Image (tube, coloured by chain):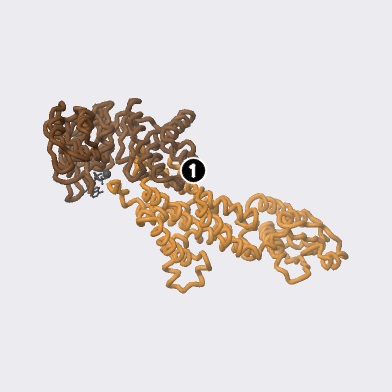
Amino acid sequence: MTVRITNLVKRYNELLAVDHLTLNIDQGEIFGLLGPNGAGKTSVINAIMGLIGIDGGEIKIFDKSLNDFEREIKKSIGIVPQDIAVFEDLTAYENLAFFGKLYQLRGDLLKKRVEEALHFTGLWERRKEFPKKYSGGMKRRLNIACALVHQPKLIIMDEPTVGIDPQSRKHIIESVKTLNQKGSTIIYTSHYMEEVEELCTRIAIMDHGRIIALGTKEELTSLIGLEEKVVLGLASVNYTLVDKIKKVAGVKDCVVTDHQVTVISERDKGNLGRIIDCVSDSESEVLSIHMEKPTLEGVFLTLTGRSLRD
Amino acid sequence: MIIFISNVQRMLRKKWNLIPMLVFPAALILLVMWPNMEGTRILRVGVVDHDATPLTQNLMDVLQEKAHVQKIRDTDIQVKLTEDLFDYVIVIDRGFTGKLIKNENPMIKGYRIQEANTSAPVRIGIESFINAARNIAKVSEGDSDKFYRGMKDYQNGSFAMAYQTIEDGTRRKRNTVFVMGFLVLGMLFFSSIAATLVLEDKQNNTFYRLFYSPLSLKSYMFQHILSLLLLSLLQIGAIFAIMLLVFKADFGPSVFNIFAVFAVFSLVSVSFGLAISSASKNKRQASVVSSLLVTPICMLGGCFWPREIMPDIMIKIADFVPTTWILKAVEKIILGSSLRGATMEILILFLFALIFFLVGTWRRVDLEKL
Ligand SMILES: Nc1ncnc2c1ncn2[C@@H]1O[C@H](COP(=O)(O)OP(=O)(O)OP(=O)(O)O)[C@@H](O)[C@H]1O
Ligand SMILES: [Mg+2]
């Protein structure tokens, strides 16, 4: 077990930031910690790293307690902090070298690792520049690179993609996958559904310091039902079309309103193509398609009655 | 020691830091010392030695240390002085040594062309030499063997000291003492600015990030303080070098001792900087606080003018600022005291360092503020 959190409690004065949280993360997972602002994600991470005192519970990392093996444990963890934390007065290269040395890397190995991290995050070309000259996305990537120089067994990324362009985001997502394939366990916090859905093997949804749902993406979405909905906007509608659609495998219902046909179908049947075939068979034309799959967003909405992002 | 090394590098890399570190004190020193630069020219002294005894030879050897000494003939005095070949000419009459040993009061005549101060060191040197000789003559009770043995001891041993502590003609040393005040000012400024590196790192979050790594807060603080101390010592060294090499400043009997008291003061200035940084929320606040504190502390301590010209009440208050004590120590040592002679001042400086250090580290660094 890479991380084992049992009944963690963290208070900031009156505020209960983490409320009896229990969580186990296996080796090799990409574990998603999803929750709205103030859910307590960062508090959990800081508790794991021993940076904040905790008010209850137990945390074990690599089956060891942080109190007794602090140096050893910290050496094998890389943290990407939520707020960008890089030295403005050091170049990208120097930043990485600095963090490498903090983790006791020296000499040729240090050089090699720094180069690897720079290539990995696509910053090699601009390694001699100061972060001041970087775009937001590049700074984010540097922020990530600093956590990777020492090739940690466990990488904890706290909202690594906040406020960046889609391209950088894509780059980061791909990097996370690669890191995982290379053998690192990853904890990934976010309040972006899409990222967590795409990346994570298991997901915990947090709210008010508690885990309100935990499982694979499929397990979570199945919590709110097993159906998906397709809304077709059509040039013309006739009833034979509706009958035809109803006969497509997996379709449970089909309702017509004006020029719209709403099809309710079992999940993941892959029958959209056949539904569209029906439309063209009846010499109508599809003007618009709108699919509604059950999403984590929906899960969150259903569980809390609030949407994830304000 | 990664924090130590990288902090030193980062602080040196900031060009602005060079201003309080070097440019500012050096400029003030230049302002004061430039007009006195001429005094550093080596004096040329002519000696008319009618006596020619071992004692007069001794005297010439001693003068040689301070000036360029040449024997000349009686008849040349006028010419050599007017042609500006010599700054000062002395005439030693026949029988000078004999009279001296017999406890009489023989005189050495001195000639100079203008009422220039430049010959002061030579005159004082001669005076002190003859004074010493007279004292030894008194003890020797007219025995010339005894006298010369005494002279020998004197020259081997206490001579340097006696020479340095003559009451008068210490203008250049006083000058050095005076400009040392600017170094004190520069040190306080520089240390309090350099110490804000922590605040900067807190602002850009790197400070907190450090402790995700195996680094401990204790080790961090230790290395941070060490880096500040090293820079402070570099500052002292650089300013000393400028003063010695460019201005030929007179540090009195021991540059090393002066450096040593400044090293003690660097403990004060570094912990002063730490205290300010720990009390301030951000860099801007720290620099405002430091300029509000450093200037009056330096004024009280006598960095800009002699303490004695201040009203009595201010002089009393000045006892409670560290600048007073560093300057007192510096003055003592430049004017000839040993380090032991300044024990009290040095102890008080240590006390100030301790107080500032406690203030600076009292407030636990708050890692919960993540
Ligand atoms: N140092 C602190 N002092 C007081 N309260 C804090 C502190 N840090 C966090 N909190 C509070 O604890 C709660 C949980 O905060 P935390 O930062 O863990 O949430 P988060 O899930 O990381 O949120 P976000 O998505 O905005 O990063 C919040 O209500 C926050 O205001
Ligand atoms: Mg957070």
Q: Residue furthest right?
A: B75
| Residue A226 percent coordinates (x, y) | 14, 32
Residue B354's place in the image compared with A125, above or below, is: below
In the image, the residue with mark 1 has its CB under 8 Å from the nearest atom of ligand 2: no
User: In which image quadrant can residue A267 be found?
Assistant: top left
Residue B186 located left or right of residue A290: right
Q: Residue furthest bottom?
A: B311
Q: Which residue is rendered at x = 71% and y = 57% of the image?
A: B66
User: In which image quadrant can residue B27 be found?
Assistant: bottom right
User: In which image quadrant can residue A81 be found?
Assistant: top left
Q: Colour of chain B?
A: orange
| Residue B316 percent coordinates (x, y) | 42, 68
- The quadrant in which the N terminus of chain A is found is top left
| Mark 1 lies on residue | A129
| Residue B306 percent coordinates (x, y) | 53, 68
| Disc 1 element | loop
Residue B163 located left or right of residue A139: right
Q: Which residue is rendered at x = 51% and y = 49% of the image?
A: B233
Residue A150's place in the image compared with B58, above or below, is: above
Name the residue nearer the viewer: B310 or A176. Answer: A176
Q: Colour of chain A?
A: brown
Please give the chain letter of the residue carrying mark 1: A
Name the residue nearer the viewer: B83 or A94. Answer: A94
Q: Which residue is rendered at x = 41% and y = 40% of the image?
A: A142
Name the residue nearer the viewer: A232 or B364. Answer: A232
